Every structure is written in C-alpha cells, then in structure tokens.
Amino acid sequence: MSLQALIFDVDGTLANTERDGHRVAFNQAFADAGLDWQWSIEQYGQLLQVAGGKERICHYIQASCPHWQPPQDLQGFVAELHGAKNHHYQRLLAQGVIPLRPGVERLLQEARTEGIRLAIATTSDLPNVLTLLEHTLGKDSHHWFQTIAAGDMVLAKKPAPDIYHYALNQLDLTPSDCLVFEDSQVGCQAACAAGCRPIITVNDYTQHQDFSGALLVIDDLENPCHPLTPQVGGMNGAESVNMDVLKSLWRTSTS
C-alpha cells in the first residue's frame, strides 16, 4: 500500500485567483450589464464562504439587493452574468497576470516523475481550469491530470463532498489512496466529508479559518525568503513540501 494520487483544488490552491482574478472579472461583468454592484476586496472575502460563482451571485442578490428588481428569468440572468464573468476572467489569465502559487509546479513535476497520479477537484468551471493550466503550465498540461472534476459536474458544491466522490470514482481509488490540497475551510470540509485528509495552503482570505481534520496547514508549498512554519502538522525539518514530506504525511494519515 502506498500513496497513489494527489488531488488539487484550483482557486486559491494552484493559484491565488480570487482577489485579483475572479473578483475583478465579476465587477467587469456587472459594469457591462449596467449594474452598480462593485465587490470590494473585503466583501469578496465574505462572499467566498459561498462556493460557486452563480451561487455567489444569487447569495449577493438575496443578502444585499433588497430593492433591486430581478428579471423574470433570474436563473437565466445569473447564468448569463456568470458567463460574462468567465469571459473576463479567462482574458485576465491569458494576460499572464495570475501565476501559480510558489512550489506548485515543482511539486506537480515531482509527483509526475515518481508516477503519482494527479487530479483536480474544484467548483470552478472547466474552461476556467483549462485556461489557467494552459497559461501557467503549458498548452498540453491538462494531460498531466488523469481527471479534472470541475464546475457543475456534480449537483452539490463544496462543502458537500460530491466533487471528491466524483474524482475518486474517476480515479478508481479510495480516499486512503490519496492526499488532497485545499486552501479554504469550505474545501477542507468537503475533502474530510469524502474521507480524505487535506493539506491546506492558506491565503489572505482563509488564513484564520477552521481547518479541523487537516494533516498540514501552512502558508505555501515553499518560500525562498524564510523557513516554512506549519500551523498544523509537521515537515520533519524539510524546507519545502516535497514528495518525501507528502509520503510521511500520508503514512500518518493511514496509520
């Protein structure tokens, strides 16, 4: 028995896409639609408690727009607005303004070298995932991942475990065969509910959230400027989260 696969969330985990990517794209879509909605950095952090872009728009309308008159086909309106957001977001990705988080590409390459399978489990729409991969890892990098579970492939989004159940089914693996990478409490809850033990790389939006059940909680996979100091878990003196660290964490999770 050995570690078989690594499963990655995307937004906030592979790259810090939320504040300067999705938020900016939402605001551009709102302006295009003639709406006076403008999501601030702080407000968007609160909205991230709701998984899924269309769901986030609906939540905002219900919570913050009591006097706004919705169109008759609200669901269609939200879907169109979200599609416009995705267009702006993909344009931002194509400009190369959103890099991968430190250590992500290195770890992916290490896993590939050792024959560890890779997968993605995210609430982000599939075209957004593919565009991010293409403009950070290369045109054919989506082939690195045996399965990409994304967007509306399941009915219930995180913190429901459905997207992880779907990914595991596609991989034909059990939760104990894998390690999961997340950045948020919602993602941590989804992974744990699926029976997986996540590794959390926090960001400015998530650093104070509850990560009960995580194997490791840390700022990044690597930092050349100072040693990594885990909030939860240990790295046995390693300077970065590498395959040796992951195998040790996996053994801890299965013992």
Image (spheres, grey):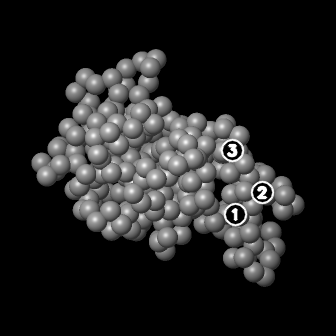
Q: In terms of depth relative to the viewer, which is nearer, 7 or 215?
A: 7
Whether residue 185 is visible here, answered yes or no, is no
Whether residue 94 is visible here, answered yes or no, is yes
Contact (Cβ within 8 Å) of mark 2 with mark 1: yes
Q: In terms of depth relative to the viewer, which is nearer, 204 or 9?
A: 9
| Residue 75 drawn above or below residue 28 | below
Pointer 1 local density, CA inside 10 Å: few below 14, some 14–19, many at least 20: many
Tag 1 or tag 2, which sits nearer the N-term?
Answer: 2
Q: Amino acid type of disc 1?
A: His
Q: Amino acid type of disc 3?
A: Ala
Q: Amino acid type of disc 2?
A: Ala
* Residue projecting furthest to the top: 225
Mark 3 — residue?
A: 94
Examine the image and state in which quarter residue 161 appears. Answer: bottom left
Q: In terms of depth relative to the viewer, which is nearer, 236 or 2?
A: 2
Looking at the image, which residue is at 37% across and 20% down? 227
Give me the disc on residue 82.
Answer: 1
Q: Is residue 184 left or right of residue 112?
A: right
* Residue projecting furthest to the front: 140
Between disc 3 and disc 2, the foreground one is 3
At mark 1, the secondary structure is: helix
Q: Is residue 223 left or right of residue 197?
A: right
Residue 229 in percent (x, y) is at 35, 26
Examine the image and state in which quarter residue 26 appears. Answer: bottom right
Q: CA distance from mark 2 to mark 1?
A: 8 Å
Mark 2 — residue?
A: 29
Q: CA distance from mark 3 to mark 2?
A: 17 Å
Between disc 3 and disc 1, the foreground one is 3
Q: Is residue 197 left or right of residue 8?
A: left
